Image: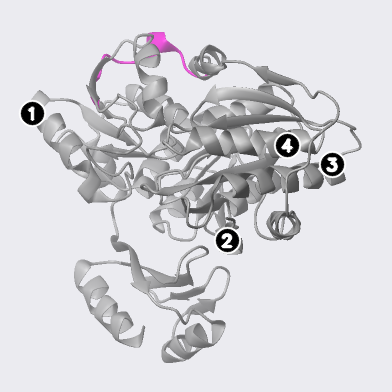
Amino acid sequence: MLNPEVFRAYDIRGIIPDEIDEEGAYKIGCSYGSFLKNQTSKKNPKIVVQSDARPSSPSLKAELIQGLLEKGLEVIDGGLATTPMHYFTVNRTRADGGIMVTASHMPLPYNGFKVSLEGAVNIGTGAGMEELRDLAANINMKTTSSRPIRVDQKNFENDYLEFLLKKIDPLKIKPFRIVVDAGNGMAGLLLEKLTKRLPIEAIPLYWEIDMTFPNHEANPLKEETLAALQNKVKESGADFGVAFDGDADRIGFVDESGQMIMADLSAAFLAEELFLKNHPGASIVYDIRSSRVVPEIIEKAGGKAFRSRTGHFYVKELMRREKAVFAAERSGHFYYQDFFYSESAILSFLYFIAALSQTNQKVSEITNRYGKYFSTGEINFPLEDRSPRRLQEIAKKFEDSKEVNWFDGLSVTYDDWWFNLRPSANDPLLRLTIEGKNQEIVNEKLELLKKLI
């Protein structure tokens, strides 16, 4: 089973086994093998395959590898990994591409694949995803390769941790007390080894890897998933808390009172206190949903701010084009030039404590300092009709605005508020973000837009 709808904007993802099963994984391996051979002149390109610990991942990975071998690829099986560790491995081995078996933060029964080329450059819509889908649709049955193809099994955990720890000076880290919630996800693979190398007191929450997610969904974007973390921070008197998503490419922070820190405010903090101090005048990328305080802070600190469409494919593409040192999305993805223009939640954790160690601030001061505007966050509206026509009808209601643009969905700006309304790339949803100078404006405009939607 391989439903063509699982080939999404940024990855391949679906319900197991109704939308993807082992046969589908084999077809994806074959289609990727053919695609990669078209991208390179090498007879036997080298690919890294790794996975998260979902119950369905071992069988999917085995069939995926079989498909890759049938097409003559040499495979490095890197075992269990976080998604950022996978990006590191693709680069460390100088592989021609990589496939990570994961559905990120999605709950069971989802699983899927994040696919990339040399340098861990992601494949997405308009950059190979449609070709992968079409190639897979034309694969009907297994074949048998007549010659042996190499499969190397290696472990890259220690290499990855050493690489990350070289990014900071542990001697300059303050002895913070931090509650660390792995959410039973893949961050638990690395956290014990990592925290032992730092002068901090790490209070563990759900470090045992169990991707049936028995305690809570591993999605730090949702405040309801942070309840245990918030309670533990208050109960233990910790300086702050962090939470990782399922494949450890996103991170969320809570302050010493347990209050959630929005990711765009954390981004403003890192931009001002770390990256623009270490790289004066540097370029920094932020996504369209982010608070307007982010570009304001970047420019005030002497940097160059670049707005991106939402989604890691677009953020990374813009980062490379502008040679940006740092990028952030409101979803909790933080990207780094010195990490192959990719995201790493554990590196974000390290950079956050490094930046905080340089200041005398409490984490709550981040919200106090950067939270000058009021926001709804991103609100989802289930809607089958996400056509441009629908958005154009809504846009007509705001012809008196300061600006209307179609950079990523519909964005409308007034002097005291703005909103972005965009169709989801993956789901039958419209996603709305509103920000204003006070809560009253935000509440008023939210009611207006609810009626229009």
**Foreground disc of the pair 2, 3:** 2
Residue pointed to by mark 3: 37
| First-in-chain label (2 vs 1) | 2
- Indicate whether residue 172 is drawn in magenta: yes
Residue pointed to by mark 1: 235
Residue pointed to by mark 4: 68
Position of 145 compared to 181: left or right? right
Q: Residue at x 63, y 33 (%)?
A: 340
| First-in-chain label (4 vs 3) | 3
Q: Residue at x 46, y 66 (%)?
A: 427
Position of 169 compared to 209: left or right? right
Within 10 Å of the Cα at label 2, are there few (<14), some (14-19), or many (20+) other Cα atoms? some
Q: Nearer the viewer, residue 392 or 441?
A: 392
Q: CA distance from mark 1 to mark 4?
A: 50 Å
| First-in-chain label (2 vs 3) | 2
Q: Nearer the viewer, residue 242 or 275?
A: 242
Query: Which range is magenta?
Result: 167-179
| First-in-chain label (1 vs 3) | 3
Q: Which quarter shows the N terminus?
A: bottom right
Type of residue at label 2? Answer: Asn
Within 10 Å of the Cα at label 4, are there few (<14), some (14-19), or many (20+) other Cα atoms? many
The answer to whether residue 125 is above or below residue 265 is: below
